Amino acid sequence: FYRELLSHSYPWEYEYSLEMPSFIAGNDFEITGISERAFSEKKNIEKVVIPSTIQSIGNFAFQNCSNLKEVVIEEGLTFLGDSSFWGCGFKQIKLPDTLETIYPYAFFWCKQLETITIPKNVKNITLGTFNGCEKLKTATILPEHDISIWGTTVYDVFSNCTSLTDIFVPANRLQYYKTADVWSKYSSKYKSL
């Protein structure tokens, strides 16, 4: 029960703490995830530090936290849920190398986002991940392996990113990105790292 941060009326919610609640004694409990909608619509959050104990961020966890300007994610996170940072106000976010899966719409309508790097261990990225990130200019994709990806004719990874000019990929993967289904939509934007 206490292995995931929940959005209840405990005093620690108001501090937006990801540390173990003070009413739990001993070292028997560790928070390993942020639950669905835990901080959704909290307009007063400006900065979040995700400690290394957090392995997953649930669906809609920080959705529409429009004043969230800074997010620090320590190594340890492996999963970003559906719409987890939808509509947040940060210009950049450093994703940890431990990240493996990014679910649909994770950064949908992050209209201030200017640059993003997909970490080297990402294996899955899905529908509309960066859709509507109007100020996104550059993306860097570090994995040297195929990334499982899917999209639709309306929403794919970088759909509606009207400022996107450059997508940097490893030199040995350039041809893959230019010709692979879904990725090939951006063939004119790819450049070698």
Image (tube, rainbow, N blue to C red):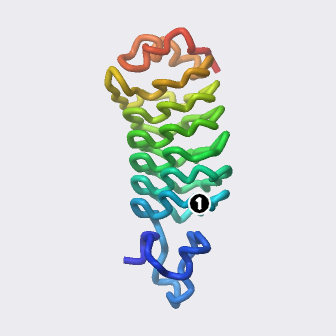
Q: Is residue 81 above or below residue 177?
A: below
Looking at the rendering, which quadrant does residue 100 occupy? top left
Helix, strand or loop at disc 1?
strand
Looking at the rendering, which quadrant does residue 15 occupy? bottom right
Q: Residues within 10 Å of mark 1 (few under 14, many from 20)?
A: many
Q: Quadrant of the C terminus?
A: top right
Residue 139 position within the rendered picture, expressed as x and y whole percent measured from the top left: 59, 27
Of residues 61 and 182, the one nearer the viewer is: 61
Q: What type is the residue that disc 1 sits on?
A: Ile
Q: Residue at the top extreme?
A: 188
Residue 66 position within the rendered picture, expressed as x and y whole percent measured from the top left: 59, 50
The reply, left or right, for residue 96 in relation to residue 91 is left
* Residue at position x 67%, y 50% in the image: 69
Residue 74 position within the rendered picture, expressed as x and y whole percent measured from the top left: 61, 56
Residue 161 position within the rendered picture, expressed as x and y whole percent measured from the top left: 54, 25
Q: Is residue 106 above or below residue 171?
A: below
Q: Quadrant of the N terminus?
A: bottom left
Q: Is residue 109 above or below residue 19?
A: above
Q: Is residue 8 above or below residue 110?
A: below
* Residue at position x 62%, y 17% in the image: 165
* Residue at position x 43%, y 71% in the image: 6
The reply, left or right, for residue 7 in relation to residue 135 is left
The residue carrying mark 1 is 50
